[in-house]
Image: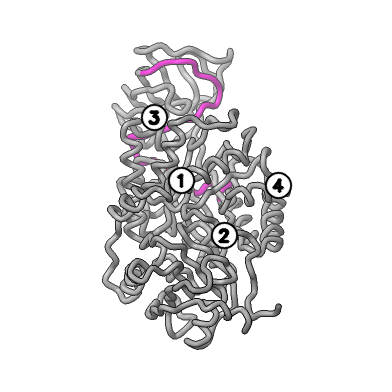
């Protein structure tokens, strides 16, 4: 059968709306494993630039694009930039033991450290520190308080002691550091990612809106920009950072180190709400199924953690080490998929989702999208079909969190790939339409072919006229699927 459509999905559409991101690594980079991950439920492949070289990353990207051709479904690739890595120096005689209340010095001297001092090779930190500020070492296991400062020297008191070894990480939660989010390595990695036509770039170490603005200028629309919220300083400018980003991530690694633990769940809810209010995609990440690195089953607490993110309305949940280096990558994806489907089938899920409903902005585009959600409920439609060039029409529909799937039809393969991160969207790359009648016909045909609706179902169509004008959602159409539309294809 010949059609005017560019790609026809041959996969069974996902039954869940929240998306799953899986990080590729030594345990999951083979073509066979990448395909297994996709078939098990992965929607977005994350490539972590903190490990490995460009050659390995290019091979993984090539494999994902080959899978795209094989399945007929656009695959979404997210490249995660490393960001600045703050670490102490080395010790002359191996690990040391710091006792509570002891004095300990950080300085710029390159002599190996001992029980009284160690090098901190980051002049920027010394410039930003103040007496009373805290430093956290080794993922927060050790806590120091600055008692005195001189040029390039910080005298500290050990508040929480413990074993300390070479090159452990440093976090400075109390101050905004005069460090750019992009290092020279990040700039090289970003150039590589854009040359590879990846779909999303995740920016680490975001402290201020200017960090996001700089990356947006470099990216220039070639990929979506995702800001990782992992610094307390970013929370102080959260609204501005969300506004400048295409998506944000609740990166609970450093966030959990630099914030008091009881504050992390509150911060997560605040970030998710801020993103949803502005129609931006939001990812919840870090240690979601951590025990599955070495175990085929998760803990009950981990199941509840994933479930909570789904209840909050996150667009996506993410696996890190579980899929990158873990012993059970496909099982971790299967567990996450099962949790998400269970929660989305819970009647309480709809109640919680509706309680978090975002009031639409006073624009014609938002009015149409909000109306589509209401029409679906009133006429019991089975599907929303959106025609979108830039993705904005589809994202407005997703922002409403309707009870039915959303089929996004777009003439842009880049848009189709980028929308793979969004809640409830099934994006298909297809040729554009030139008339209202053609739009309705294609919407019916693709609704049936995607298997998201059947003959006899009602569907709701939204689009912008004139066609091909980004951000001009101004049409809503209700139609029946009669079942003979495919005969005309």
Magenta region, mostly helix, strand or loop? loop
Decide which of tag 4 and tag 2 comes sooner along the chain.
2
Residue to which mark 2 is pinned: 13
Tell me which segment is drawn in magenta.
160-186
Mark 3 to mark 2: distance in Å?
A: 61 Å
Mark 4 to mark 3: distance in Å?
A: 43 Å
Where 173 falls versus 416 (above or below)? above
User: Which color mode does the image show?
Assistant: one colour
Decide which of tag 1 and tag 2 comes sooner along the chain.
2
Residue most toward the front?
Answer: 456
Q: Secondary structure at mark 4?
A: helix
Q: Residue 281's x, y, as percent?
A: 43, 56
For mark 1, does the 10 Å Cα neighbourhood hold few (<14), some (14 to 19), or many (20 or more) residues?
A: few
Question: In which quadrant of the rendered view does residue 9 lie?
Answer: bottom right
Q: Which mark is residue 405?
A: none
Residue to which mark 1 is pinned: 342
Question: In which quadrant of the rendered view does residue 53 lie?
Answer: top right
Asked if the residue under mark 2 is in contact with the one under mark 3, i.e. CB atoms within 8 Å, the reply is: no
Tell whether 313 sits left or right of 34: left
Q: Which mark is residue 151?
A: 3
Residue to which mark 4 is pinned: 56
User: Which residue is at the front of the view, 125 or 144?
Assistant: 144
Mark 3 to mark 1: distance in Å?
A: 57 Å
Q: Residue 214's x, y, as percent?
A: 45, 57
Mark 4 or mark 1: which is in front?
1
Q: Residue 259's x, y, as percent?
A: 35, 34
For mark 4, does the 10 Å Cα neighbourhood hold few (<14), some (14 to 19), or many (20 or more) residues?
A: few
């Amino acid at each position: 059968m010949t059609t005017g459509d560019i790609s026809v999905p041959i996969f069974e559409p996902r039954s869940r709306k929240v998306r799953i991101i899986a990080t590729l690594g030594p345990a999951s980079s083979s073509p066979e494993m990448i395909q297994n991950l996709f078939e098990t439920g992965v929607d977005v492949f994350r490539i972590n630039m903190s490990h490995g070289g460009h050659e390995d990353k290019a091979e993984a990207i090539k494999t994902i694009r080959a899978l795209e051709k094989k399945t007929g479904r656009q695959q979404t690739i997210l490249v995660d930039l490393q960001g600045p890595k703050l670490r102490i120096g080395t010790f002359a005689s191996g690990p040391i033991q710091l006792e509570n209340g002891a004095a300990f010095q950080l300085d710029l001297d390159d002599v190996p450290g001992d029980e009284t001092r160690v090098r901190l090779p980051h002049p920027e930190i010394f410039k930003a520190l103040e007496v009373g500020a805290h430093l956290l070492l080794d993922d927060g296991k050790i806590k120091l308080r600055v008692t005195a400062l001189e040029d390039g020297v910080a005298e500290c008191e050990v508040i929480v002691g413990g074993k300390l070894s070479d090159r452990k990480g440093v976090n400075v939660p109390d101050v905004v550091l005069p460090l750019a989010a992009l290092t020279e390595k990040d700039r090289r990695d970003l150039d590589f990612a854009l040359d590879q036509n990846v779909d999303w770039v995740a920016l680490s170490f975001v402290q201020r809106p200017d960090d996001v603005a700089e990356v947006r200028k470099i990216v220039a629309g070639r990929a979506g920009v995702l800001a990782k919220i992992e610094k307390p300083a970013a929370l102080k400018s959260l609204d501005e950072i969300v506004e400048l980003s295409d998506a944000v991530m609740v990166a609970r690694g450093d966030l959990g180190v630099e914030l008091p633990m009881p504050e992390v769940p509150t911060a997560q809810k605040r970030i998710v709400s801020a993103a949803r209010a502005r129609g931006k995609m939001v990812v919840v990440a870090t240690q979601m199924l951590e025990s599955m690195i070495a175990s085929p089953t998760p803990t009950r607490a981990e199941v509840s953690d994933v479930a909570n993110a789904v209840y909050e309305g996150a667009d996506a949940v993410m696996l890190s080490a579980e899929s990158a280096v873990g012993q059970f990558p496909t099982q971790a994806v299967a567990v996450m998929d099962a949790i998400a489907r269970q929660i989305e089938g819970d009647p309480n899920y709809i109640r919680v989702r509706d309680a978090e409903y975002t009031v639409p902005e006073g624009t014609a585009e938002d009015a149409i999208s909000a109306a589509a959600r209401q029409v679906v409920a009133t006429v019991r439609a089975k599907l929303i079909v959106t025609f979108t060039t830039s993705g904005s029409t589809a994202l407005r529909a997703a922002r409403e969190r309707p009870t039915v799937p959303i089929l996004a039809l777009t003439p842009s393969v880049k848009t189709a790939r980028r929308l793979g991160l969004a809640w409830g969207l099934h994006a298909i790359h297809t040729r554009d339409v030139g008339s209202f009648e053609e739009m309705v016909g294609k919407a019916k045909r693709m609704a049936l072919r995607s298997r998201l609706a059947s003959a006899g179902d009602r569907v709701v169509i939204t689009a912008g006229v004139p066609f091909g004008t980004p951000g001009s959602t101004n049409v809503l159409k209700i139609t029946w699927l009669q079942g003979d539309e495919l005969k005309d294809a």
